[in-house]
Image (cartoon, rainbow, N blue to C red):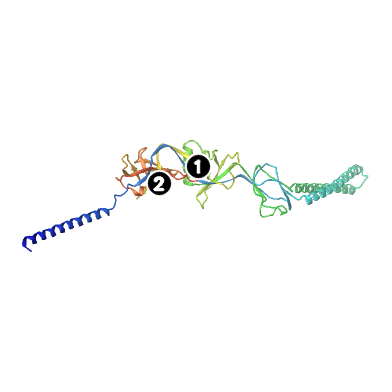
């Protein structure tokens, strides 16, 4: 091969090699671009506008309901239960018949007592007549002093026996009456704890039933010394008394009971074991809706903050003693800023500094964002309210 032909062949091989390298580079570049990670997705957060409104500041306590009067029904004589005359759980009237004990033994005792009294009355009348005859004769010395003394003694003895017979008859009549057990009050009658045929007695360990006066109904709760002083000072400042502070009752379904109550009893001293006062409040209960044993929250409104700014508690993050919120601006950028918080109101928190009305704060997704980040927003949907409402408490100042 001539030198010229050899150079031409070498040139062709060089061009092919260069083209191969270029193709390989293109393939490698395309493969690298294909495996590059996609840009991060924009975080989706739920936001809520800071609401401004007048907010009542209140205190709450767990309360247990009880009858204003709980009349315990017990037998007063011994005998067999033969009848129950009321429906358990119903309203019964004062004097209404509840139970009957077999009266036959007591009827016999009453009849016997009547017979004994009749005998004693006859003897008394005889001795009285005899004494009436002897007294004039004794005055004329027609009979001896001994006869007069005997007649007087016999008459006094007969009188005493008649009085004893009267007492026995009264007791027999009472015992016969006790076989019919009636309600001493108007109220709700509980479940009977004795069955027909049971032998009842005054010494039996359990009661027959209980009748509770529930209108008004009594609600017991415990008040700490600090809470008592706060309420007392607020009442005094308003020219009133702690007992006159109006009370609301929050039922277990979260509803507010329509009738206001008031303090009826404030214990005379603090319980040394709990450090609290025991308080009893009375609430009207005209429809007997409330029953002993139910629970609720007793609420006392202490003051009202005008134009308070509120956000959900979950929108506020506590970090090293400071309170932070993530605000989303009109450009959907996040601004994390410190705020000063006040009272808690149910599931919301009052913000006194660091936030303006109608600004949007992140209520769900705060852990996904940082200042300056762009986010996609959705409207925050709060969870269902707690069963018996929230409690307003003072919060630490940030």
Marking on residue 340: none
List the residue tagged with mark 2.
314
Q: Residue furthest bottom?
A: 1
List the residue tagged with mark 1.
299
Question: Which tag, 2 or 1, sits closer to the chain's start?
Answer: 1
How many marks the image carries: the answer is 2
- Mark 2 in CB contact with mark 1 (< 8 angstroms): no
Give the crowd class for mark 2: few <14, some 14-19, many >=20 residues within 10 Å. some
Question: Could one spot residue 155 in this view of the protein?
Answer: no
User: Element type at marker 1?
Assistant: strand
Residue at x 46% of width, y 37% of height? 237
User: Element type at marker 2?
Assistant: helix
Where is the N terminus found, in terms of image quarters?
bottom left
Q: Position of residue 81 (x, y in %)?
A: 73, 51
Question: Could one spot residue 58 in this view of the protein?
Answer: yes
Q: Residue furthest right?
A: 142
Where is the C terminus found, in terms of image quarters?
top left
Residue at x 76% of width, y 48% of height? 176
Name the mark nearer the viewer: 2 or 1. Answer: 2
Q: Position of residue 124 (x, y in %)?
A: 86, 46
* Viewer-closest of 353 and 375: 375
> Along the horizontal axis of the image, is 167 left or right of 144?
left
Q: CA distance from mark 2 to mark 1?
A: 24 Å
* Viewer-closest of 114 and 43: 43
Q: Residue furthest front?
A: 1
Give the crowd class for mark 1: few <14, some 14-19, many >=20 residues within 10 Å. many
Q: Position of residue 337 (x, y in %)?
A: 32, 44
* Viewer-closest of 154 and 276: 276
Q: Position of residue 125 (x, y in %)?
A: 87, 44
* Viewer-closest of 382 and 250: 382
């Amino acid at each position: 091969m001539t030198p010229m032909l050899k150079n031409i062949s070498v040139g062709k091989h060089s061009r092919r090699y260069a083209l191969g390298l270029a193709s390989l580079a293109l393939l490698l570049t395309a493969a690298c671009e294909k495996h590059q990670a996609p840009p991060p997705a924009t975080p989706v957060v739920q936001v809520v506008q800071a609401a401004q409104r007048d907010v009542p500041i209140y205190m709450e306590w767990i309360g247990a309901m009880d009858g204003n009067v709980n009349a315990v029904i017990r037998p007063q004589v011994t005998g067999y239960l033969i009848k129950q005359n009321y429906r358990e759980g119903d309203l019964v009237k004062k004097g209404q018949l509840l139970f009957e004990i077999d009266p036959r033994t007591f009827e016999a005792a009453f009849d016997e007592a009547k017979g004994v009294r009749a005998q004693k009355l006859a003897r008394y009348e005889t001795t009285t007549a005899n004494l009436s005859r002897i007294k004039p004769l004794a005055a004329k010395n027609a009979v001896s002093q001994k006869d007069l003394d005997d007649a007087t003694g016999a008459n006094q003895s007969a009188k005493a026996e008649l009085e004893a017979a009267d007492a026995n008859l009264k007791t027999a009549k009472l015992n016969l009456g006790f076989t019919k057990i009636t309600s001493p009050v108007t109220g709700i009658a509980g479940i009977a704890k004795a069955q027909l045929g049971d032998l009842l007695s005054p010494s039996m360990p359990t009661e027959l039933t209980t009748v509770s006066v529930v209108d008004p109904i009594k609600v017991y709760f415990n008040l700490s010394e600090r809470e008592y002083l706060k309420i007392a000072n607020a009442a005094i400042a308003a020219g009133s008394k702690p007992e006159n502070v109006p009370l609301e009752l929050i039922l277990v379904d979260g509803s507010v009971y329509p009738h206001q109550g008031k303090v009826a009893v404030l214990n005379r001293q603090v319980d040394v074991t709990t450090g609290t006062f025991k308080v009893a409040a009375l609430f009207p209960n005209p429809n007997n809706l409330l029953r002993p044993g139910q629970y609720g929250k007793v609420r006392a409104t202490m003051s009202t903050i005008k134009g308070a700014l509120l956000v959900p508690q979950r929108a506020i993050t506590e970090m090293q003693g400071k309170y932070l919120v993530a605000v989303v601006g009109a450009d959907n950028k996040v601004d994390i800023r410190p705020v000063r918080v006040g009272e808690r109101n149910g599931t919301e928190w009052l913000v006194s500094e660091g936030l303006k009305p109608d600004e949007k704060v992140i209520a769900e997704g705060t852990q996904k964002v940082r200042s300056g980040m762009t986010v996609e927003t959705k409207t925050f949907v709060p969870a269902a309210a707690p069963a018996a409402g929230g409690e307003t408490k003072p919060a630490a100042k940030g």
